[in-house]
Amino acid sequence: MSGKIVILTGAGLSAESGLGTFRDEGGLWAQHRIEDVATPKGFARDPRLVHAFYNARRQQAAEATPNAAHDALARLQQRWPDEVILVTQNVDGLHEKAGATAIHMHGILTGALCAACDHRWPAPSEMTPQDMCPHCHAPAARPDIVWFGEIPYHMEAIDKHLQDCAIFAAIGTSGQVYPAAGFVAEAAQSGAETVELNLDRTEISRAFDSHHIGPATDIVPRWVDSLLTGGARRLPFV
Ligand code: NAD
Ligand code: ZN
């Protein structure tokens, strides 16, 4: 078996590395309203709060290490005879720490972006509202993160990959955040086999051909091994 594989990853992939998902109780996200910390309006209203939130997330991500699921995906990318495109909604950089390359559709915590001129540079560990853009010198530094209401990065390239992949997988993503939640329909329309790997069923489970239910560190290495040994279609685990 071969052909291009496109894999969409979400917060659930990094949960077992100690990084909370959106809906985790008690996590960073639970302590804040999304509108306050993850929208352009929230940033305009209280940049100090937004920087503090992302400074905390940046520090957490810097201390986190990839888990067995990230490692398995890096292995798949190195050994699969065709292209393996990882498209991630995660901003934690754990795919790269595991030795993979990924398309970051929601940006990355290690990046800073100038809200005035779009210049990008590596983020310091602590960003503040007074930080100046090194290019245009406006005090307009923000995290290079795609917030709600903004357009995700690299959509054109991602669409192309969805249109010519043989397999599309979604791992640890709730299917509630668009446009990523629409990728499965796009891939299926192009004839790809679709598979969902998640701790639970999701709101869009019905759109997938098959499902592997369980923690990512268990089901992802098994799925990757089954692909690499050519037996993906025959494996009985669901
Ligand atoms: P989400 O929080 O909406 O959903 C997480 C999904 O992961 C759920 O479907 C849940 O069932 C599943 N899950 C939880 N633990 C799992 C595990 N151990 N193994 C397998 N699956 C597990 O996350 P989302 O769909 O990625 O969308 C959320 C948005 O939040 C994205 O925009 C993303 O940028 C942002 N986010 C990123 C991070 C990160 O970078 N690590 C963390 C939190 C939120
Ligand atoms: Zn600038």
Image (spheres, rainbow, N blue to C red):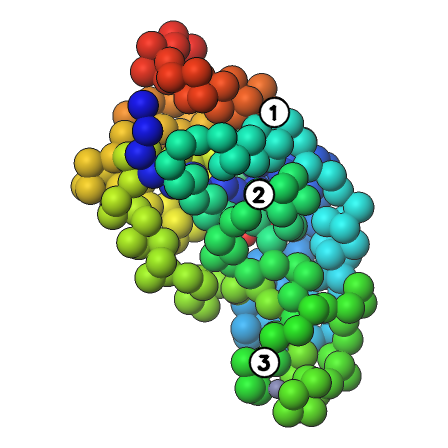
Viewer-closest of 2 and 42: 2
Q: Is residue 13 left or right of residue 150?
A: right
Marks 1 and 2, how far apart at CA: 16 Å
Is the residue marked by circle 2 packed among few (<14), some (14-19), or many (20+) residues within 10 Å? many
**Is residue 109 visible in the rendered structure shown here?**
yes
* Among the two numbered marks 3 and 2 on one chain, the one whose residue lies closer to the N terminus: 2
Q: Is residue 185 above or below residue 148?
A: above
Q: Is residue 16 above or below residue 182?
A: above
Q: Is residue 13 left or right of residue 206?
A: right
Element class at badge 3: loop
Q: Is residue 156 above or below residue 163?
A: below
Marks 3 and 1, how far apart at CA: 37 Å
What percent of the width, then of the height, locates residue 25?
66, 39
**Is residue 172 visible in the rendered structure shown here?**
no
- Label 2 CB sits under 8 Å from any ligand 1 atom: no
What percent of the width, then of the height, locates residue 75?
55, 31
Q: CB of mark 3 within 8 Å of CB of mark 2? A: no
Q: Which residue is mark 1?
A: 217
- Label 3 CB sits under 8 Å from any ligand 2 atom: yes
What percent of the width, then of the height, locates residue 142?
65, 74
* Among the two numbered marks 1 and 2 on one chain, the one whose residue lies closer to the N terminus: 2
Viewer-closest of 61 and 26: 61
Q: Which residue is mark 2?
A: 100
Q: Could you tell me the amino acid type at mark 3?
A: His
Q: Could you tell me the amino acid type at mark 2?
A: Ala
Q: Nearer the viewer, mark 1 or mark 2?
A: 2
- Label 1 CB sits under 8 Å from any ligand 1 atom: yes
